[in-house]
Amino acid sequence: QVQLVESGGGLVQAGGSLRLSCTASVRSATVAAMAWFRQAPGKERMFVAQIWSGGTTSYGDSAKGRFTISRDSAKTTTYLQMNSLKSEDTAIYYCAARLYGKTGYDFWGRGTQVTVSS
């Protein structure tokens, strides 16, 4: 069983920064990729960023140029550095894990709230 715990959310003013963390209770060798998604009130969950085990990263359009996904050397904690935050970034941010042999993100954290005040 994979458990993911997010932290680092909070209230920030527009233009500010936050760093989210996601700690995974799983052997890093079984994880193909880690990702961040977000869901704003009344909207569908959307992709923010992902990092593959080899280090390749990709970003959703809303995150490009402002957000950076990274991980620690043990590959058990994944980070999302968010800069130049906008009010439209307000959402619950979820961490997700994709294991080798799987085609999608099957494991999810409970989410952490990010609120950006304008």
Image (cartoon, helix red, strand yellow):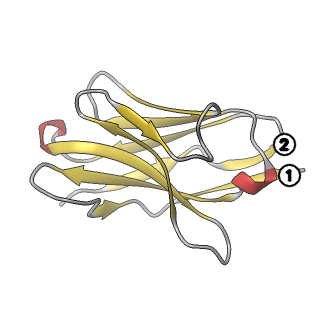
Where's residue 26, x and y in %?
20, 46
Q: Residue visible at 19% across and 44% down?
A: 31
Which residue corresponds to the image point at 25% horizontal and 47% vertical from the top-left? 25
Report x, y in % for residue 19.
59, 35
Between 65 and 95, the one lying in front of the other is 65
- Left or right: 87 with respect to 77? right
Residue 34 numbered tag: none
Residues at badges 2 and 1 in contact (C-beta under 8 Å)?
yes
- Image position of 100 (left or right of 105): left
Instruction: Determine which quarter of the picture holds residue 77.
Output: top left
Is 56 placed above or below 106 here? above
Q: Which residue is mark 1?
A: 117
The mark found on residue 14 in the picture is 2
Q: Residues within 10 Å of mark 1 (few under 14, many from 20)?
A: some
Q: Is residue 18 left or right of residue 93?
A: right
- Measuring 29% from the left and 61% from the top, which residue is drawn there? 107
Nearest the eye: 8 or 92: 92
Q: Is residue 70 above or below residue 115?
A: above
Real-space Cα separation, disc 2 to disc 1, in angstroms: 6 Å
Labels 2 and 1: the sequence-earlier one:
2
User: Is 3 drawn above or below residue 49 in the view shown?
Assistant: below
Q: Nearer the viewer, residue 75 or 57?
A: 57
**Mark 2 element type:** loop
Q: Position of residue 87 (x, y in %)?
A: 80, 53
Question: Which residue ends up furthest to the top in the rendered image?
Answer: 73
Mark 2 residue type: Ala
Residue type at mark 1 is Ser
Q: Which residue extends farthest right?
A: 118
